[in-house]
Image: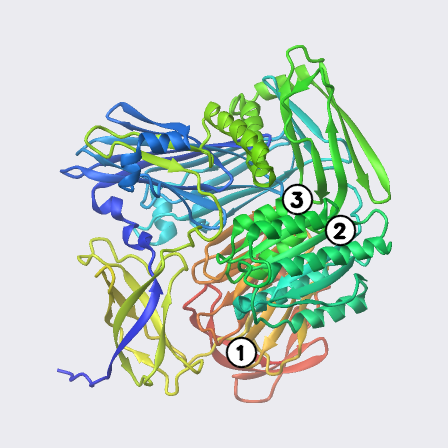
Amino acid sequence: MKVPVPVPICSIMLVLPLLLAVLQTVTAQKNGIHVYSLTVDSRVSSRFAHTVITSRVVNRADEAQEAIFDMELPKKAFITNFSMIIDGVTYPGNIKEKAAAQEQYSAAVARGESAGLVKATGRKTERFQVSVNVAPAAKVTFELVYEELLKRRLGVYELLLKVRPQQLVKHLQMDIHIFEPQGIRFLETESTFMTNELADALTVSQNETKAHILFKPTLSQQQKSSGQQDKALDGNFIVRYDVNRTLSGGSIQIENGYFVHYFAPEGLATMPKNVVFVIDKSGSMSGRKIEQTREALIKILSDLSPKDQFNLITFSSETTQWKPSLVPASPENVNKAKSYAAGIQAAGGTNINDAMLMAVNLLESNNQAELLPEGSISFIMLLTDGDPTVGETNPTSIQKNVREAIGGQYSLFCLGFGFDVSYAFLEKLALDNGGLARRIYEDSDSALQLQDFYQEVSNPMLTTVAFQYPSNAVEEVTQDNFRLLFKGSEMVVAGKLRDKSPDVLSARVSGKMYMQNITFQTESNVAKQEEEFQSPKYIFHNFMERLWAYLTIQQQLEQMVSASEADSQAFKTRALNLSLKYNFVTPLTSMVITKPEGQEQSQVAEKPVEDGHHLSRPGIGNRLFRITAIVHNAPPIFDVGVAGSPDILGQQGPPGDPHDFPSYSFRLRSSGDSAFSPPVVLEPRQVELYDTETQNKARIITEPTSASIQASPVLLTLPGPSNDTLCVDIKHSQGPMNLLSDPDQGIEVNGQYDTKKAGFHWIKVTFKNPQVQVLASPEHVVVTRNQRNSAYKWKETLFLVLPGLKMTMDKTGLLLLSDPDKVTIGLLSLDDPGKGLLLLLRDTDHFSSHVNGTLGQFYQDVSWEMTEVADDSQRTLRVQEKDFSVTRKLKMDYQEGLPGTEISCWSVEL
């Protein structure tokens, strides 16, 4: 019998976020509640989405069990109906005025039964959760209905659906129908749960005006996708599209006595702008916030047009103006501003009032001196992360001071960084002055969020836009005057047709372009439009009336923020009446959910409001854990990194696991160095994790890793019948490198190599068709299309299908950019934070004869030279009359993702 070698026992105390969903993921399976059907039916008619989610469950246990209906919906959506059918009896949700519902069910509210049915769960979604006790063998059908008007942002509409069944489902189906009379210009789908196995269950069909997307995976496909018998799907399914449009007065669409007018003309020139950036540099902005602010500001400055003028104001306890007046966005001034932005440091208090008044006075003094170009647009962009603490600190007084100073002449856009700022304060500040407010979430992509918001408002095309319709034709028209139209956005006006309206509805849209006024005329045949919306069977009929009600309520709620007390009450009354009439759960109404006798008799679902400090952060806070690990050769102090997604801590154990706690994987790293010396060797054994708050236990599986065989930063498949693999090692930092470029393929790959990390610091892949840029760093992947950024963290499952390009990423962190007619480019980020990115190429036979670059050269005139050396592990490779010495070496091949496999390849040093 082998005697085990004594090893030190290390106890570690650490704080980790615990998500309840981890321990509850298979609750339904464990307690006998089985979901046998889950369907999502979404019908988009002229941008208005009507979504029905239906879940059918059965209790297979011998005693009554709790069934939980848990779904996520977009924040901008209004719930319109929820019901439960239990033993043939329907228990509906009744929508009432919020005050009346709370008064009627005050006892339930006092017991806390009303709390938590709908909660904000992230940037774009709210979570709806209802539970009910189910008798043995009984079945329950849950049905949730919600509606939203899809908003055009940076040139696209986006429909977001959440798929989270929590278990394998025999009948799982997602059905999406889109009907756009203007014609669908392009359509793409993206998923964070799709895999190659599940992709076979996805079908997308499309003609000029209609699209149908069906996702219907079998049990087998669900199981193969996860590789585990009990692993369920969990993620987002996103459809993005845009419609055809021309330089015209827009599209008027009519259905069942209501009309909607969409206006987003193509081909208009962008107006020059005068912008003052007001940046908070108080002490609370220190660390990652100020770093990301500097990064975003430098990128935003690069995007300024030479026609623009700008200035910077930074503030903490004191306020500082970069230049005495606005300066042209010349290359010289922009570079100087970038240098100034790069040096911004965080310290001190928060004096918002003085900073804002300085910004207004700056624009005003330039205006009076006639330094603002005729026909230009002026606005202020404020970024802050906290409430005022210095100078004037009363929010109402600050709002009044700013409103009076601006006097309706300029627009104000407010960005609230994080959750320590009153969003309600910033929202009113912006809406009072013709602008918008946006929360910036603290995350790795905060800089991108800042850039994206700027892109939304950086290209004004029209100002003072007014819609006019014949007074004898329409009534109860929504907002028909707008301050600014930005490129990539859309103005929407809706209303009722009068009883004796003309056969043709005409409209006149007027506005101001750069240096000139412009007027558009358009008209629509009422009978023809009515017929168009009656023909498609799957279209949600009478949708336009509900679209009108939805839009009216949204606008009334927004106007309440900046209106006087008397006007605010009038807006509130109208919004409330429409919410009750059309059965919308809005901030003014509540849905009372009834249950069978003997259970909680009432629960109240309310619409969350993003009002600042009280908005719940993702997650539920921190928990204290104690871990006991068995480690060889460990230094006295080391960190523990838990492997897993940000949302789920670890993964469930195998089916039938006798333990009631999940399994985790973790690795150890030195607190001061990127690697141990000597390296840590982990025993492949279990380690116990103990939650001191809930007394839950978890089991950690330690996994030894091999560090003897290194990964090559670049793997190339050489041309020719042998399919030899070339491992490229770059020994010298060379700054940004042109790795490969193929004009015929429309592909260009650039990158910067980091010799210390033995990998790339960043890699940028640019495609000409479709026009897409992929910028990868060890932190995340950023995909840019039409100045719109999407950020993805490594190891987040991604399945994005564009016309002419497919992007996939699996949980190993392997990102593949592919198309049947293109070279496949693979990017990989290793687990080790001390390592750089790796680059892989597949399907290299698609390279044209015009490929070039540091790596592209290996696909031009390549031949093996004869050698007299007896050692067959060394050869000479001739590339375009240049000789390279190559050596046979063992390397780790990550072409199929982690953990990789050993291969023998020809290694070349560059």
Relative to 849, say whether 483 is above or below.
Answer: above
Return the x and y of residue 730 as percentages of the image width and height: 59, 79
The circle on residue 758 is 1
User: Which of the pair 474/874 is nearer the observer?
Assistant: 474
Dot 3 corresponds to which residue? 155
* Residue mark closest to the camera, 2 vs 3: 2
Give SS at disc 1.
loop
- Which residue type does callout 3 highlight? Gly
Picture quadrant of residue 643: bottom left
Q: Residue at x 28, y 62 (%)?
A: 663
- Report which quarter residue 754 is drawn in: bottom right
Q: Which mark is residue 378?
A: 2
Residue at 56% x, 59% y: name it.
388
Q: Residue furthest bottom?
A: 869
Residue beneath the point at 35% across and 79% down = 638
Disc 2 secondary structure class: strand
Nearest to the observer: residue 210 or residue 468: 468
Kind of residue indicated by mark 1:
Ala
| Callout 2 crowding tier (Cα within 10 Å): few <14, some 14–19, many ≥20 | many
Spot occupied by residue 199 in the image (x, y as percentages of width and height): 47, 46
On-image quarter of the C terminus: bottom right
Spatial CA span between label 2 and label 1: 48 Å
> What is the x, y in percent for residue 336?
75, 71
